[in-house]
């Protein structure tokens, strides 16, 4: 029994640490979308700049949800974003965003499994809703770049 409890504690602390990585990625996304949406200039990029502004607001909502959940689980939400890459080329900025979204989705799919393994079904449900918005972001970026949405998953979530 004691052993099972300590395994549970270990899994919970791994979940909290991983959620803090997710939170740092959300901060990164807020910053990137805020900067990129203003730096993308030219008629060709006007529509996507408007999309990126919307993404920035959605990433803030994700950050608030993840920070709440970290606190709820007994952790301390991080205050440090992952590094935001800058470029003068619009295509580079969109590609950085697309790579980050793909990485974010990969991570959240893993997080759903971790949350469910611990019986945190409400958290898993919230993560699923976030994943579906991240997939829309990924789709918007791939469309703007004129490429296929990266297929990186061998399994669903
Ligand atoms: Fe997000
Ligand atoms: Fe996103």
Image (cartoon, grey):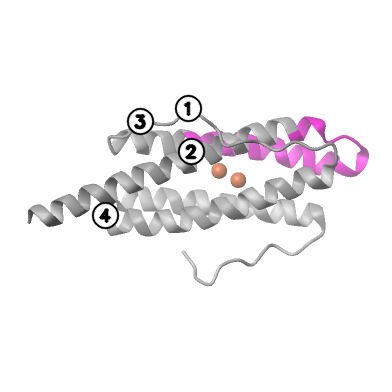
Q: Is residue 120 left or right of residue 60?
A: left
Tell me if residue 48 comes above or below residue 36 in the rendering.
below
Provide the residue span drawn in magenta.
36-63
Spatial distance from mark 2 to mark 4, Cα to Cα?
20 Å
Crowding around mark 3 (Cα neighbors within 10 Å: few <14, some 14 to 19, many 20+) is: some
Q: Tell me, yes or no, whether the highlighted magenta stretch contains residue 53.
A: yes
Residue 49, given in percent of the width and then of the height, sits at 78, 38
Q: Which mark is residue 118?
A: 4
Residue tagged by mark 3? 76
Q: Nearer the viewer, residue 156 or 1?
A: 1
Q: Are marks 3 and 1 in contact (CB under 8 Å)?
A: no
Q: Are marks 3 and 4 in contact (CB under 8 Å)?
A: no
Q: Nearer the viewer, residue 119 or 102?
A: 102
Residue tagged by mark 1? 79
Residue 119, given in percent of the width and then of the height, sits at 26, 55
Q: Which mark is residue 23?
A: 2
Secondary structure of the residue carrying tag 1 is: loop
Spatial distance from mark 3 to mark 4, Cα to Cα?
19 Å
């Amino acid at each position: 029994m004691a052993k099972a409890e300590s395994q549970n504690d270990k899994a919970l602390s791994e979940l909290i640490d991983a959620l803090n990585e997710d939170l740092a990625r959300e901060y990164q996304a807020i910053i990137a979308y805020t900067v990129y949406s203003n730096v993308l200039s030219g008629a060709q990029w006007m529509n996507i700049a408007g999309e990126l502004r919307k993404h920035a607001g959605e990433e803030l909502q994700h950050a608030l949800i993840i920070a709440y959940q970290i606190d709820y689980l007994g952790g301390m939400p991080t205050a440090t974003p992952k590094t935001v890459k800058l470029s003068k080329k619009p295509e580079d900025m969109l590609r950085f965003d697309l790579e980050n979204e793909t990485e974010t989705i990969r991570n959240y799919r893993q997080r759903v499994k971790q949350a469910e393994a611990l019986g945190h079904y409400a958290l898993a449900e919230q993560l699923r809703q976030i994943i579906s918005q991240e997939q829309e972001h990924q789709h918007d970026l791939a469309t703007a770049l004129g490429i296929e949405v990266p297929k990186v998953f061998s399994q669903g979530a």
